[in-house]
Image: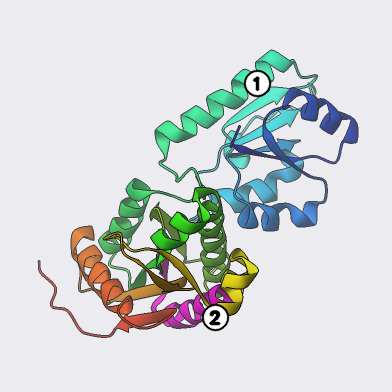
Amino acid sequence: MTELITIISDDYSLNKTLSAYLEGFNTLFITQRASIIESIYNTPPTVVIFNGGMRYKDFISTIREDHIFSHLPIIVLLDDKEFIKNWKDLPVDDFITKPLQREEFIMRLYLSIERSRRIVETNPLTMLPGNTPIIKEVQARLDRNEEFALAYADLDNFKPFNDKYGFSRGDEVIKMTGRLITNTVKLHDPHNCFVGHIGGDDFVFITSIEKAEPASREIVKNFDEIIPSFYDPEDREQGYIISHSRDGTVKKFPLLSISIGITLNKGWFKHYGEISSAATEVKAYAKTLEGSTYFIDRRSYERKD
């Protein structure tokens, strides 16, 4: 199974049972409370399971209030004596009462995953919101007349890299890029940000206008520091690879870089299509610049009512 099941539990006996139940799944056990949020941000799971209800209330609320990870399905495992009267205080998707029955546990797990996929579109590789939630998030901010920065980011020369090293290593680059953008944007603008994955090597992020440049500067810097580690030593040392261009020509390609185009909304845009078109244009310009870079469109736009 490619789904990542993150389990928050300090009960080692239960963890041993869950490990047996979930044989064949990709599982991550977190036993320390201090590591919960950091782990979810660094390695976004398909579903989160908390061994306990109200004692994890604050962590569950943090996830639910996060613009990026609010869609994650959450299951709580409850003792038979734990009674939850007001589920608004514990905004989870399902609960299972202990002692666990393997068949019921697995069925409820599958149901939570499928329910989440029906309700919210996420990219299966990065577990970030996909196209539909991206559109909804941007349009909601436009409808509220918010001022914000919309950034489109993608990788330069990704296809030649994929052709040379294969899809598996390409997927690792995509996941790294998603984690890098998410962690950096959240660090700079934790309460106002949003990150989405359009697909392939294309990402979107939203910040306040004043945070867009420092966040983008840090993404570019850290990307260039990390990306050489994905190359074989000889390619890393020479600073390029030999691969095929889109027309089939064999040529040299520099190491992967990231291009970010940023559009500022100061009440100029009314519809998602308008600001998306502007952001696409700015990103296309950013990609004409050499190496990893960001470019901010500082033009003023006339609002079309």
Q: Earlier in the sequence, mark 1 or mark 2?
A: 1
Front-lying residue, 261 or 298: 261
Q: Residue at x 32, y 51 (%)?
A: 136
Q: Residue furthest left?
A: 305
On residue 221, the disc is: 2
Label 1 sits on what residue type?
Ile
In the image: residue 23, left or right of residue 185: right
- The residue tagged with tag 2: helix, strand or loop? helix
| Residue 22 position (above or below residue 71) | above
Q: Residue at x 87, y 36 (%)?
A: 11
Label 2 sits on what residue type?
Lys
| Residue 4 position (above or below residue 234) | above
1 or 2: mark nearer the eye? 2
Q: Residue furthest front?
A: 250
| Residue 149 at x, y percent in the picture | 36, 73
Q: Residues within 10 Å of mark 2 (few under 14, many from 20)?
A: some
Disc 1 and disc 2 in contact, CB within 8 angstroms: no
* Residue under pointer 1: 106
Quarter of the image holding residue 17?
Answer: top right
* Magenta segment, prevailing SS (helix, strand or loop): helix
Q: Residue at x 27, y 63 (%)?
A: 142
Which residues are the magenta region?
206-225
Front-lying residue, 198 or 238: 238
In the image: residue 6, left or right of residue 173: right
Locate the C terminus and report the quarter of the image it occupies: bottom left
